[in-house]
Image (cartoon, rainbow, N blue to C red):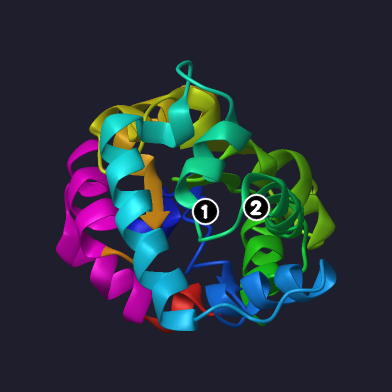
């Protein structure tokens, strides 16, 4: 019995797998700054400052501050730059609004065909992502990746668990329902440490078989 014939569910990572960021962070700071009559900030300082702040916040308040602080307050701490308080508030609000829309993202050309192929094959399709609630509520629908394309979502900002914690994959298995066994699930992502090792340990231990499946013509749509 082939691996593909055993599958009843596929879970898919989102950013880097189904969708991608467009442009650079500095581009969006620049647009927000210009909107309030200011010049573009230094792209390198924006990028480096954000990276440091994001890493710090992710360690102190994981899952976008889940149960500890509002989502918007979490992002505001990551978005610091040398503006006075009133100006910073205006710039931040624009950036926060932009990243809560479809504007800074693009959908990979093969994402929708793949999801539709999986549904046509009768597979349950789930999304497992280290993303905040706006992905499910606003961003993915705005990009045309509606619930018609997938059956359930597990987003770290809504669950308080993030990859590579094995619990997020166990939760996905529960959400899939229908008494689906771990060996009947395939997880697809773009990061080995977060999407392969832990997922493989929970939902599909035979990673060699997964690689053979992904490289075969059977999974092309």
Q: Position of residue 220 (x, y in %)?
A: 53, 80
What is the magenta range? 192-215
Which residue is tagged 1? 79
Q: Residues within 10 Å of mark 1 (few under 14, many from 20)?
A: many
Q: Is residue 171 visible?
A: yes
Type of secondary structure dominating the magenta stretch: helix
In the rendered view, would you say 164 is above or below 98?
Answer: above
Question: Closer to the camera: disc 1 or disc 2?
Answer: 2
List x then y, in percent, for residue 39: 69, 81
Badge 1 or badge 2: first in the primary sequence: 1
Q: Quadrant of the C terminus?
A: bottom right
Q: Tag 2, which secondary structure?
A: helix
Q: Which residue is mark 2?
A: 88
Q: Is residue 221 visible?
A: no
In the image, residue 8 lies at what x, y percent? 49, 44
Of 165 and 200, which appears nearest the observer?
A: 165
The residue at 56%/40% (across/down) is 132
């Amino acid at each position: 019995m082939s691996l593909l014939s055993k599958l009843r569910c596929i879970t898919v990572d989102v950013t880097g797998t189904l969708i991608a960021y467009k442009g650079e962070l500095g581009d969006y700071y620049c647009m927000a700054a210009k909107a309030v009559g200011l010049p573009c900030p230094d792209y390198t300082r924006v990028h480096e400052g954000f990276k440091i702040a994001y890493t710090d916040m992710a360690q102190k308040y994981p899952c976008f501050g889940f149960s500890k602080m509002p989502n918007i307050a979490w992002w505001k701490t990551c978005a610091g730059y040398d503006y006075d308080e009133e100006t910073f508030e205006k710039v931040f609000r624009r950036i926060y609004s932009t990243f809560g829309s479809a504007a800074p993202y693009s959908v990979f050309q093969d994402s929708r065909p793949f999801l539709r192929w999986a549904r046509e094959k009768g597979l349950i399709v789930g999304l497992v992502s280290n993303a905040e609630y706006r992905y499910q509520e606003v961003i993915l629908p705005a990009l045309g990746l509606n619930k018609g394309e997938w059956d359930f979502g597990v987003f770290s900002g809504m669950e308080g668990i993030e990859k590579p914690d094995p619990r997020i994959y166990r939760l996905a298995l529960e959400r899939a329902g229908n008494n689906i066994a771990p060996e009947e699930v395939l997880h697809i992502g773009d990061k080995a440490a977060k999407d392969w090792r832990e997922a493989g340990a929970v939902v599909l231990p035979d990673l060699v078989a997964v690689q053979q499946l992904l490289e075969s013509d059977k999974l092309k749509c």
